[in-house]
Structure formats: C-alpha cells, structure tokens
C-alpha cells in the first residue's frame, strides 16, 4: 500500500486499517481539533478486508463491547457512538474514500490564491492556505474552486464546488487533478471523499484519477 497513505491514516486516525475485521482504538486525536478547528469524536476508514475506527481513549472499550454485542454491525454501531462520546447532536456519515498517486495530466484550469485574498469566494475561505479558483476570463465570475482539508502532513483531502452554470464542461475534474498534482508535489497523498449516492462527485473523482477501490470512511459529523 502507498506509504504516504498509511502514514496519513496512522496520523489522522491513530492506527491503520486492520487486515481483517474492524479494530476499534482509542486515541487523543479524537478530542483534539481537526483541520477545521472542530472536534471529530469518531472517525474510521475501512478497506474491503478490514478497517479501523478511532474514538476517544476513555470510550474505546465501551464502543468495542457495543460493537461485539451488535454482531459486529457497523451500521448498528454508528448511530450510538455520538451519544457514547458525549456529542448527541452529531450525526453519522459514510463516504466513499479515494486517493490517487497518478492524477491525469489535464491542462490547468485554475490559479492558486491565498484563502484570505479579497478575490476568494466566501465558501473557500475556511480552508486556509492556498485555494484553487477558476474564473470566467471575460467577466471574472467565479466558476469553480478547490479547497484543501490539511488533515496532517501526509494526507490532504480535496473539496470541489462548481457553479451551476459552469457544470458539464469538465472543469471540476481538471481542477481536482491540478490540485492533486500539487498535493503530491508537496509530499502528501491527495484524498477525495463523497457521499455514496453522489454520482456526479463520483464521476469527477474517477475522471481525476481517484479510483473507487471499495474503501469507505465513516464517523461522527461536525456539530450542526
């Protein structure tokens, strides 16, 4: 497996996916702020062979016991974890988890600007660092952009949004591939996650070199 991916998962989750079954581990990382400054009290990633779910250290034994009682059914366990870790207002998410080491050499579609630049759209500002923006050369209108969730030094997750009037042009895939190349150049692994039902996002990911290998990410969402 790609070394940088394993380094990222070890840092982000506190451990790597098991070779079979699901390892439930306790880590102080689940009580420390994430890329967005918020606490993410339960996070996991699973391959078709096995996975890892990280929770606060003081709750690991309780969560593992409940998982065993539920017949090792993650879908049954998920909704119970937020209450166990003290965040009943949180929901449970499941996402297709993708990464790439060989994004296609599409022509660049955007320019990198600081997230706090006056020209940066409001939705991209929370990402910090540099963000990727595509604009209409004639009007200057924002067409699409990519922000980077810098989870740790080894794994950076890409988030892309395209304006309705700019969809269907292949713009998102070019931006995602461009951002992925930069992440790789910086020594990290580019990650892409999306809801399993979001077929448009899945198509962008596939076109930008992020194959679906049957991996999933799951956990407690941010506070609403």
Image: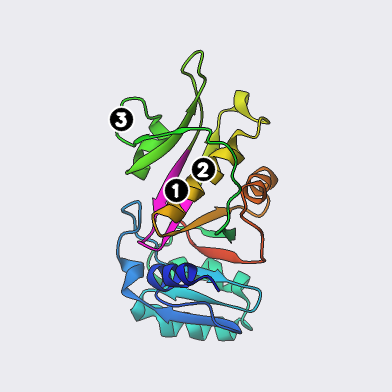
Compared to residue 216, the image places residue 134 above or below, namely above
Q: Position of residue 50 (x, y in %)?
A: 60, 79
Compared to residue 54, the image places residue 140 above or below, namely above
Q: CA distance from mark 2 to mark 3?
A: 20 Å
Q: Quadrant of residue 211?
A: bottom right
- Tell me the quadrant of the picture where the N terminus can be found: bottom right
**Dot 3: element:** loop
**Dot 2: element:** helix
Q: Which residue is mark 3?
A: 117
Give 222 or 25, whichever is nearer the viewer. 25
The residue carrying pointer 1 sits among few (fewer than 14), some (14 to 19) or many (20 or more) residues within 10 Å by Cα, namely some
The residue carrying pointer 3 sits among few (fewer than 14), some (14 to 19) or many (20 or more) residues within 10 Å by Cα, namely few
Q: Which residue is mark 2?
A: 178
Q: Which residue is mark 1?
A: 182
Magenta part, dominant SS: strand
Closer to us: mark 3 or mark 1?
1
Compared to residue 58, the image places residue 87 above or below, namely above
Is the residue under label 2 in contact with that under label 1 (CB below 8 Å)?
yes
Q: CA distance from mark 1 to mark 2?
A: 7 Å
Residue drawn 39% across the image and 31% down it: 122
Looking at marks 2 and 3 on the same chain, the residue that comes earlier in the sequence is marked by: 3
**Residue 213 appearing in the image:** yes
Q: Position of residue 147 (x, y in %)?
A: 44, 43
The residue carrying pointer 2 sits among few (fewer than 14), some (14 to 19) or many (20 or more) residues within 10 Å by Cα, namely many
First to last magenta residue range? 146-157
């Amino acid at each position: 497996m790609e070394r940088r991916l394993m380094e990222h998962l070890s840092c982000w989750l506190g451990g790597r996916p098991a070779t079979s079954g699901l390892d439930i581990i306790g880590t102080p990382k689940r009580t420390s702020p994430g890329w967005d400054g918020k606490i993410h009290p339960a996070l996991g990633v699973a391959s078709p062979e096995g996975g890892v779910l990280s929770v606060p250290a003081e709750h690991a034994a309780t969560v593992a016991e409940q998982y065993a009682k539920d017949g090792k059914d993650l879908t049954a366990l998920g909704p119970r974890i937020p209450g166990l870790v003290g965040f009943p207002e949180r929901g449970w998410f499941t996402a297709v988890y993708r990464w790439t080491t060989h994004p296609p050499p599409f022509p660049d579609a955007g320019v990198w600007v600081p997230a706090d630049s006056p020209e940066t759209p409001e939705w991209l500002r929370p990402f910090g660092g540099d963000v990727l923006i595509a604009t209409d050369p004639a009007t200057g209108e924002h067409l699409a952009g990519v922000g980077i969730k810098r989870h740790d030094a080894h794994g950076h997750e890409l988030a892309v949004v395209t304006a309705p009037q700019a969809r269907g042009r292949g713009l998102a895939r070019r931006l995602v591939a461009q951002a992925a190349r930069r992440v790789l150049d910086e020594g990290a692994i580019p990650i892409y996650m999306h809801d399993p039902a979001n077929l448009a996002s899945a198509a962008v990911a596939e076109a930008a070199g992020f194959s679906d290998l049957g991996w999933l990410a799951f956990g407690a969402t941010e506070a609403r």
